[in-house]
Image (cartoon, rainbow, N blue to C red):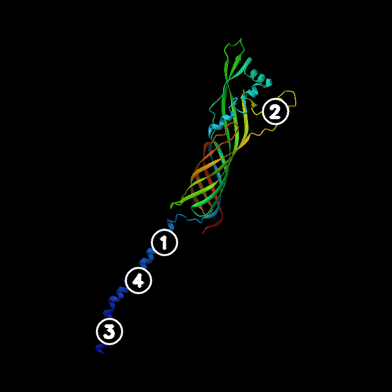
Amino acid sequence: MRTILIVFTALFFLSLPAIAQEKTSNSQKKEQKKTQKHGMKEEEEEDPNPFPLRKVEFGLNFGAYFANKYSANFYNGSPGNVNTVNYVMSNITWYRAISLALGSIDTVTVDGYPTDMHYNVAFTGGLFVRYNFNRKNSLFLQADYTQLRAADVVTLLVDPNPYVSTLPNIYQAQVIGKEGRVMIDFGYQRSFPLKSRINLFIQGGLTMCYTQVIKSIFVVEGTEYNLVNIYGSQGYQPGYNSQTFSVNQNAFGFGGYLGVGAGIPLTEMFGIEPGFYTHYYPTNLQGYSDFKPSFGLYLRILLFFGKSEE
């Protein structure tokens, strides 16, 4: 009996190191599991693409357009353009009305035309669609519309009433142009996703611009005179039912598009994209066929539809 007790006591003390080693091993395994879970959690928090990628994205564009001033001189009324101040001044009825409005009993002559007209900054709006092959490569198509306005003054010399003054008066009459442009861009987008969830991108492609002249006028003392000849060779004659013709002054221009921006996803179905771009194309209005750069800023509101990549 004593021998058996001694044997069991010896076995107990011999097993203590093994039990301690097993406890240490189990503790290490638990720590490893905690570390792995913590690492997975950190990876999830740092995931640069928390939302599923949609194959098709639609957007609404809102922005500002800075059109190149080159074709704004189309509206300056000079003899080199299709719409001229001389067209108005050569009509005896309009000429007499202008002379009377300016207090002249002799002559009114054009002394100078503006040579550096420019467009005002204009609002743009349009539609956008993008097809994503993956998070870095996409094709896009967008169409935007804007209305541009250009204004300056033509200098007139007015021979006054000789009983009042013997020197000619200088009068500045406004020339104003207004046009609409539809700009369609199609191209490729390369994206650079960041861990901050912001998606930087660069876009390049082709541009088609359709330009439509809305208004080209000469304004004297509040009276507007249309510089577009809508009466043909017969001209305007008061007291007669002068026939008018529909005159469309429009043109297509083709060129390139380059833009940069940042995509900011807000939810799984909604995001915004601020950006900047440049167009390089000719308006092709008569006499203005050179390629010139124009610029734009936009804020795009994105709506995500369709199946996701994941």
Residue at 27% across, 84% down: 8
Earlier in the chain: of badge 3 and badge 4, it is 3
Crowdedness near tag 2: few (<14), some (14–19) or many (≥20) residues, C-alpha within 10 Å: few
Q: Which mark is residue 8?
A: 3
Earlier in the chain: of badge 4 and badge 1, it is 4
- Residue of label 2: 232
Query: What is the C-alpha distance between the residues marked 4 and 1?
Result: 21 Å
Residue 73 image offset from top left, x and y in percent: 56, 29
Crowdedness near tag 1: few (<14), some (14–19) or many (≥20) residues, C-alpha within 10 Å: few
- Residue of label 4: 26
Name which quarter of the figure residue 91 lies in. top right
- Residue of label 1: 40
Asked which secondary structure carries label 3, the reply is helix
Given the image, on which type of amino acid does mark 2 rest? Gly
Given the image, on which type of amino acid does mark 1 rest? Met
Tell me the mark number nearer the camera, choosing from 4 and 1: 1
